[in-house]
Amino acid sequence: MPIVYFIGAGPGSADLITVRGARLLGQAQVVLFDALADPALRDLAPQAQWVDVGKRGYTDGSALQANINELILQHAAQADVVVRLKGGDPSIFGRLDEELQAVIGAGIACEVVPGVTAAVAAAAGTLRPLTRRGSGRSVSLATAMTRTGDLHATRTADTEIYYMAGKRLGELAQRLIAAGWPGSTPASAVSRAGWPDQQHSEHTLHTLGEASAIHAGRPTVVVVGVGASAVTPPSAASPCAASIPPDARPCGDAPASTPPAV
Amino acid sequence: MPIVYFIGAGPGSADLITVRGARLLGQAQVVLFDALADPALRDLAPQAQWVDVGKRGYTDGSALQANINELILQHAAQADVVVRLKGGDPSIFGRLDEELQAVIGAGIACEVVPGVTAAVAAAAGTLRPLTRRGSGRSVSLATAMTRTGDLHATRTADTEIYYMAGKRLGELAQRLIAAGWPGSTPASAVSRAGWPDQQHSEHTLHTLGEASAIHAGRPTVVVVGVGASAVTPPSAASPCAASIPPDARPCGDAPASTPPAV
């Protein structure tokens, strides 16, 4: 009896997959993967047939999705262990529901292995926790763009993260301000979160539009609100904090991850 | 020069940590861990001194937190590689901001390794994606309980996940209904998400209160809204779907994870 494992590859570098996901890749006969996955993940399943199903970030792609669903079923009819490898976490903006429907509908056993989603990778890579004591109790994850191509923005959580909005950040900022966020609200744009070449830029909503050029052509998540601001020591006058030269990479801020904030 | 790694252990079983987190644990001289971490994680750092800092789920614990911050600094003064191992992901409800403040304030280098947060583990373990095509574009993560012990509930996202609300789910349901959710809204309660003994119960807001007894004494996340309902095949009359006996573990629904829904 075949089994399909839906595995979250994590947001970037291959070593952000879970140990469980890595182990199950080693058992796969077929791996269906998206375009954004780290090629180094192939080393975890050299024995498997790797099939690029070619999904790249946001796409209307209903036809594409139907093809992917069909491919999963076709391979499950011929292989005992099929892995559907998805960027980030399968349950968040991964269209897992559609693939599960197909697999469940066909009566095929499956299992979902969770992963690291881009929002928390961006938080880790910029040392900006999404929740903050006292001021940041709620976090919202959303896609800015609707299927019809409209931009949607809200002010519902202390920290809001928008996936897949890289090209239209000026417009997103306008909508956020219209939704009630002050123009001075901190915003943090992180592209290729979880990759060695992650880039990060700091903004307010007034200047967020500039991030589209900085991160052009790179998958980008935007953090708005409490979780977008840098963590500062209790006392800014702390001699220790003051003693850190800006280029000393305190707290893992790799240069690539922090170009001069705009 | 010492470095402190804040590593997300994932929500449950040791193999839900990332490959990177596992590798860095192998380099640690000291590991400061919370009470909820899987003891099997110790096998990843047998060489290290393991220090239980004793945090268990929700706690006001400001004094406790200050002690943890102090412990991190003390160990960083004596060891080159200190790991602060946190359940789930460090950036979500992990009080990472307070520990980062202490470490940054002391001028100590650090890095954050993201992890799998309980919400996505619950989604994976119950095959209920948090986002759904067309109907589920936004996800909110929140703690139901404020520091003052009040319960807080909203209706701001298509799918809302509440952490650490296990004891007062009846009251939470009332507040959700007061916030505008219909009493018939699906709610899914998952305790010990990501563990072999994960338990799952299905409810509406009208019956969510019953989940407190079902999951008593176990860390529980509650999913409300679109993401709380089971994924159903396009045609319920699908002969394949119909052919799955309830106990055949289709799609990885381990018996332990699905006691008779309430």
Image (cartoon, coloured by chain):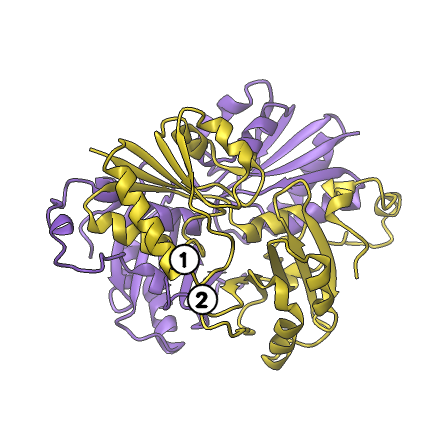
Chain colours: A purple, B yellow
**Could you tell me residue A212's position as x and y percent?**
30, 56
Q: Quadrant of residue A180?
A: bottom left
| Identity, as a three-letter code, of the amino acid under mark 1 | Ala
Q: Residue furthest bottom?
A: B178
Q: Decide: marks 2, 1 in contact (CB < 8 A)?
A: yes
Q: Which residue is mark 2?
A: A151
Q: In the picture, residue A31 is in which quadrant?
A: top right
Of labels 2 and 1, earlier in sequence is 2
In the foreground, B249 or B167: B167
Residue drawn at x 65%, y 23% as measured from the top left: A29
The 10 Å Cα crowd at callout 2, few under 14, some 14 to 19, many 20 or more, is some
- In the visual, does B59 lie left or right of A133? right
Res. B184 image quadrant: bottom right
Nearest the viewer among B246 and B26 is: B26
Subunit ID for the residue under disc 1: A
Residue at (72%, 25%) from the top-left corner? Answer: A79
The kind of secondary structure element at disc 1 is: loop
Q: Residue at x 74, y 70 (%)?
A: B207
Viewer can see residue B234: yes
Q: Where is residue A224 shown, x and y percent of the image?
A: 36, 63
Quadrant containing the C terminus of chain A in the rendered view: bottom left
Q: Quadrant of the N terminus of chain A?
A: top right
Residue type pointed to by label 2 = Leu
Considering depth in this image, is A154 or B23 the residue closer to the camera? B23
